[in-house]
Image (spheres, helix red, strand yellow):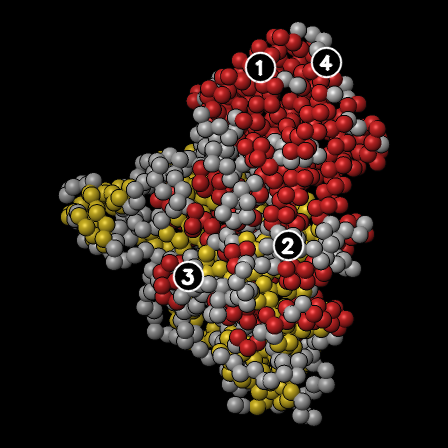
Amino acid sequence: MSKAKEPEQTDTGRISNVSGPVVQAKGLSARMNDVVRVGEEELMGEVIEIEGDVTTIQVYEETSGISPGEPVVTTGSPLSVELGPGILDSIYDGVQRPLDVLEDEMGDFLDRGVDAPGIDLEKEWEFTPEVEEGDEVSEGDVLGTVPETVSIDHKVMVPPDEAGTVADVNEGELTVEDTVVELEDGTEISMLQEWPVRKARPTADKKRPKTPLITGQRILDTLFPIAKGGTAAIPGPFGSGKTVTQHQLAKWSDADIVVYVGCGERGNEMTEVIEDFPELEDPKTGNPLMARTSLIANTSNMPVAARESCVYTGITLAEYYRDMGYDVALMADSTSRWAEAMREISSRLEEMPGEEGYPAYLAAALAEFYERSGLVETLGGDQGSISVVGAVSPPGGDFSEPVTQNTLRIVKCFWALDADLAERRHFPSINWNDSYSLYRKQLDPYFEGEVSDEWADTRQWAVGVLDEESELQEVVQLVGKDALPEDQQLTLEVSRFIREVFLQQNAFHDVDTYCELDKQFRMLDLIQQYNDHAFEALDAGVPVDEIEDVEAAQRFFDIPVEDDWEPLVDEIEDQLDSEFQEMY
Amino acid sequence: MKEYKTIQEISGPLVFVEVDEPVGYDEIVEIKLEDGTTKRGQVLESGEDIVSLQVFEGTDELDRNSSVRFLGETMKMPVTEDLLGRVLSGRGNPIDGGADIVPDERRDIVGAAINPHAREYPREFIQTGVSAVDGMNTLIRGQKLPIFSGSGLPHNDLALQIARQATVPEEEGDDDTEFAVIFGAMGITREEADEFLEEFERTGALERSVVFLNLADDPAVERIVTPRMALTTAEYLAFEKGYHVLTILTDITNYCEALREIGAAREEVPGRRGYPGYMYTDLANLYERAGRIEGEEGSVTQLPILTMPGDDDTHPIPDLTGYITEGQIYIDRRMDSEGYEPPVDVLPSLSRLMDDGIGEGFTREDHEDVANQLYAAYAEGNDLRDLVNIVGREALSERDNRYLDFADDFEEDFVNQGWNTNRSIEDTLDLAWDLLGTLPKQELKRIDKDLVEKYYPEDAEAEEEAEATA
């Protein structure tokens, strides 16, 4: 959260009513969405309604013991985040208070009334300028760089709405508040910027994304790819693996920067991330994963108003790195908790509810959030992107509920998690019949150029087999597999390989957890080769039992977990050829 | 302290009082009736002139002449190590006729959230001695693992079995005084409560337990504070005194009913099925009080029990619970009626923290693979049962028949161990291998080949070879 600024205005309001996180004050002159300090303990709050003399405030901290008559003062500025070097490798709560600093100040449990700057104001950074005296600079231009972490060079930019001629340049070890560049009109620019979280940062232009965000997850990259700058939703009932999928994306996707927002989820899960990420390697650079990651953790028992704001905090941090020209991936787990926080606040305001008690502006809020993603031309003329992946937790696993439905109207990738698959321990339990990606067409040229000409055809073949299987399964349920004609039995066998070898992927296996694109393609291609051989053999009169006994096919299961996979695939390919040749 | 005789309105469990001095939100109040009896309550909303209160003991016999005193503090739980062995009411007063409690500390019952940065990720396994739990859905210290049950099912027996048998393997040998059980009962019947108490006394578990009893005929509003009292005690014992605390909360469904009752009395906008929109947050505030803290000896593990209305796990109570807790154990009605003890349906059950707390150094190297294989094989056998009903066993292949037998054996031998059998994790895994031995080796695709070589039962292997040669 913006640093512990001394309240600017002197006219103090008085609390007139307290009901949970919603507090009303009288005699306060604050603007809508301004941050205010509530009570003797100076709890942080935000103005959400003004009616006559009564100002309604949502408070980001526990309000027990607060009573009417206590003072309320406004800071005069809206809820903002601090932007500058030091955001990466950090873990924040929903209003950008660093959790490690809070732990130092108030111990193992989260107390209230403690504020801490989002960025370390003391720390010195090595600033290397990229401009000289006399250069003309305008908003978004890069003034210089700072090595923020081993992986990422932080670019210090001219804040939006500023421009001029460089009068003076500093370099060397500086704190974020020191002036790095002074303009001729006297404007001093430091590494530190502030930005209100509810307002999207400006860009020059929005573009149509054409490169995939490579995730190393076979079912996603091959069947349902997401673009860099795209949006995806992962809805699923509890226990279906939303969080594991989100963690996998945060770990393996080839974004430059990852912002992970844990919104109203489990404390232990966030701890897992905090413990794991510094240990894990970034697949792209080999550096610790935390060096490209910023975490926002507002667990389910932390104050509900901060849960409402945490997705905005997250996306603003993402936008800031996008403006530097980086590809950013934002994972929000879970957007349903965010929507519920909106509902909770809205019902305390006694607003007229829309569907299922959610506020009528739910759809607008979701749309506004997802629209902050995209591939853009930055103000500085670079290209940057934000890909947003939002988990959705539909009550009872029912996708017809308002949050899922309103999300689906906006996002272009739908990765539907399925409780049945999870129960069968088929992971990732993404249902291949229900899921879709509208990016397939626009990303195919990339895959065809980078991996293989046959990428799209092979994928379509696999989709076809899976479709056919789901129809056949209905019959099998009634009469058993052996009652089917031989060619259909063979289709089932082929689709079993697609499911068990290709679509299943073990997130907890050292090798299988990440599957490069070439390997993905060769695996699927190999299954297709088996398919072609098998049907030829069937046509030549070989009984289906014999085809199913092909030993090479059993070895498919070894490929996912094999690190040195290329020789293995070659070998199995040869073995397939020879086994089928011997057959007839 | 000022006394008000200005009650304006009494409605359900709520009382509205006119005040002329500010009163803190969440503060505790004492209400004195004309006959001298007192009731306690809590501030739900504090305005300049009117304060609304919820009264824990119900509003019976209250009238506008009753006087209200604001105590100037939020609800506190007196905590001390001496609470072990005591039986308390749902509001934390001793009801076992023993000595008064001399508290070490009085703690706010609305626990602050543990800073996620201060947490330690739970990894140590708790051996419950129940194969369906240890083998398939391992309980980890610091986990919250609810039992999803239905009315008339033996969830209490399972909870008791776990409370009785739970040990932490590395501490076996030295005395387990470090293990404490907190039992928080919300709205259960006198009979159920007696059953629990008797069992606790019989097994000597009471010495290491603190029991909170809010019975079915106690006021519903009191149910809101009972679990908070229990968890405050648990946190104190765990993080101040270094105990490993297992907290059993039963029945969460009654707790949620009480929440709904208060919500309705306050005329709040209801969420799904009339439950308040903040029920997720409210439940999270209970469940998230499980965990471990870096640098602290103890841990709080939660085993909440809930009965799903109509056995429907999409009902808001189990649904929201499932989204917060780290897995769930399902009690199954079919298995219960077939007499299995415990009737745990392992297929929808899940322990999210299992993967990191089992395997070499924790339980045994083959644990994860074996559990996955058991799941897969049991699921396959279970699926075939429907088909058998239609086409009969004869119409199925030999392979299918094997899986059908496997599913039956799994339920009969592995799950159905009896309430009084305490199996070590080795016993559980060895038993699993006996079962897996009924399947041919090449069917064990989920198990690492080396492990299959090491653990696959030899007699089964010999049999298989004999079959092959025959």
Q: Secondary structure at mark 2?
A: loop
What amino acid does circle 4 point to? Pro
Q: CA distance from mark 1 to mark 2?
A: 48 Å
Q: Name which residue lies at 75% across and 59% down.
A: B154
| Residue that label 3 marks | B295
Residue A151 visible in rendering: yes
Q: Are marks 3 and 2 in contact (CB under 8 Å)?
A: no
Classify A134 as above or below A442: below
Upstream in sequence: badge 4 or badge 1: 4
Q: Mark 1 or 2, which is nearer the eye?
A: 2
- In space, the residues marked 3 and 2 are separated at their CA atoms by 28 Å
Q: CA distance from mark 3 to mark 1?
A: 56 Å
* Same chain assignment for discs 3 and 1: no
Residue on which disc 1 sits: A576
Q: Mark 4 and mark 3: span between their CA atoms?
A: 65 Å
Amino acid at pointer 1? Leu
Residue underneath mark 2: B129
User: Above or below — where is B328 with respect to A490?
Assistant: below
Q: Are marks 3 and 2 on the same chain?
A: yes
Q: Chain of mark 4?
A: A
Instruction: Specify whether residue A398 is in view.
Output: no
- The amino acid marked with disc number 2 is Gly
Q: Please state which amino acid type lies under the numbered disc 3.
A: Gly
Give coordinates of residue A545: x percent, y percent. Answer: 71, 18
| Circles 1 and 2 on the same chain | no
**Residue B236 on image: x %, y %:** 51, 70
Residue at horizontal 57 percent and vertical 27 percent from the top: A557
Residue A543, labelled with which disc?
A: 4
> Mark 3 and 1 residues: CB-CB less than 8 Å, in contact?
no
Within 10 Å of the Cα at label 3, are there few (<14), some (14-19), or many (20+) other Cα atoms?
few
User: What whole-number distance in Å separates the C-alpha atoms at marks 4 and 1?
Assistant: 17 Å
